[in-house]
C-alpha cells in the first residue's frame, strides 16, 4: 500500500531534550516536506527536499533540522525543543515538486502530535 | 506579503444544499493552487490542482474553479460524508517550491 508513515504518532517531552520524528514513504517520491499545523495558523511549511541531499527552508525553519540521506526517509530533528514547538506535525511527499507537473498530488502522513513542557 | 485567505471559516449545510467555499490569494505570479480535504485527526488528502485562470476540475460532488485572484470549491448536493475541513494552498512565486496554506473552511453537512 502506497503511504507516508511517521513515528512516533504522539510524543510528550521536556524542554531541551533532543528528539527526532521519522518520516518514510514507499512511493519512490523525489519531493518531501515537513509542516506544522496550529489552530488559527493553518499548515506552515518547515523544510522541504527536492531530492537526496537537497533540502531548503520553508516558512518556519527556526529550531528545526532535516536530512535527506536516502530517498525514502526525511527525518525532522529538534535539537533543543521549546514549548512553542508544541504542535501537530505532518510529513508529505510527491513524485515531483509542485511546478514540474501538470497535476501535482501530495500525500500526507497521519501526523505526529508533539507536546513540549 | 504573500497570503492565502479562506472564507467562510465554518459552514453548516443541510444535506442537498449546494454552496461554495472561497480561497483568495495574493502572490507575485501564481504557479499553482491546490485544494485538500482534511478529516479530524488525519493528514490532508489531495483533491485538485489548478494552474491557470479559467481552469476547472471536478470530482464527484466537488468542482474547483480558478480566477486571477481567487478560487472556488463548489459543493453540489452535499452529503454528511462531505463534512471535513477544506484547505487551499498556493505555490509561492517564481524560483521556489514553497507552499502557503490557508487556514481552511470547516464544513458540516447535516442529514
Image (cartoon, helix red, strand yellow):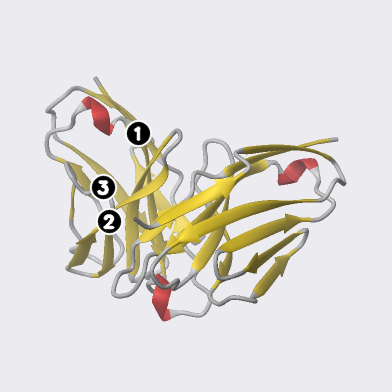
Q: Residues within 10 Å of mark 2 (few under 14, many from 20)?
A: many
Q: Eyeballing the image, is B86 above or below B99?
A: above
Pointer 2 chain: A
User: In what element is the residue under mark 1?
Assistant: strand
Give the spatial CA distance, label 2 vs label 3.
6 Å
Q: Counting other residues with Cα less than 10 Å from the Cα at mark 3, is it few (<14), some (14-19), or many (20 or more)?
A: few
> The numbered mark 3 sits on a residue in which chain?
A
Q: Residue at x 49, y 59 (%)?
A: B25
Callouts 1 and 3 close, C-beta under 8 Å: no
- What's the distance in space between the residues labelled 2 and 1, CA to CA? 16 Å
Q: Which residue is mark 2?
A: A58
Q: Position of residue B38 (x, y in %)?
A: 56, 46
Q: Position of residue A78 (x, y in %)?
A: 18, 40
Q: Which residue is mark 3?
A: A60
Q: Nearer the viewer, residue B64 or B83?
A: B64
Confirm or deny contact between disc 2 and disc 3 (CB under 8 A): yes
Q: Residue at x 60, y 39 (%)?
A: B9
User: Which of the two residues, B76 or A4, is positioned nearer the viewer here?
Assistant: B76
Residue identified by numbered label 1? A87
Query: x and y percent of residue B31 in the render?
Result: 44, 73
Callouts 2 and 3 on one subunit: yes
| First in sequence: mark 1 vs mark 3 | 3
Amino acid at each position: 500500500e502506497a503511504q507516508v508513515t511517521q513515528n512516533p504518532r504522539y510524543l510528550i517531552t521536556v524542554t531541551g531534550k533532543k528528539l527526532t520524528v521519522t518520516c518514510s514513504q514507499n512511493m519512490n517520491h523525489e519531493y518531501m516536506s515537513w509542516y506544522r499545523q496550529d489552530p488559527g495558523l493553518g499548515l506552515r511549511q518547515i523544510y522541504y527536499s527536492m531530492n537526496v541531499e537537497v533540502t531548503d527552508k520553508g516558512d518556519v525553519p527556526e529550531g528545526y533540522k532535516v536530512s535527506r540521506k536516502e530517498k525514502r526517509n526525511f527525518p525532522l530533528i529538534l535539537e533543543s525543543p521549546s514549548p512553542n514547538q508544541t504542535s501537530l506535525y505532518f510529513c508529505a511527499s510527491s513524485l515531483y515538486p509542485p511546478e514540474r507537473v501538470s497535476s501535482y498530488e501530495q500525500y500526507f502522513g497521519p501526523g505526529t502530535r508533539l507536546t513540549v513542557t | 506579503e504573500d497570503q492565502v485567505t479562506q472564507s467562510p471559516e465554518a459552514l453548516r449545510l443541510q444535506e442537498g444544499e449546494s454552496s461554495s467555499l472561497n480561497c483568495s490569494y495574493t502572490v507575485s505570479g501564481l504557479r499553482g493552487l491546490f485544494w485538500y480535504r482534511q478529516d479530524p485527526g488525519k493528514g490532508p488528502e489531495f483533491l485538485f490542482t489548478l494552474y491557470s485562470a479559467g481552469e476547472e476540475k471536478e470530482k464527484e460532488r466537488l468542482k474547483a474553479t480558478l480566477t486571477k485572484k481567487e478560487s472556488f470549491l463548489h459543493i453540489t448536493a452535499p452529503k454528511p460524508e462531505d463534512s471535513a475541513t477544506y484547505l487551499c494552498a498556493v505555490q509561492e512565486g517564481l524560483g521556489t517550491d514553497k507552499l502557503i496554506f490557508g487556514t481552511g473552511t470547516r464544513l458540516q453537512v447535516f442529514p
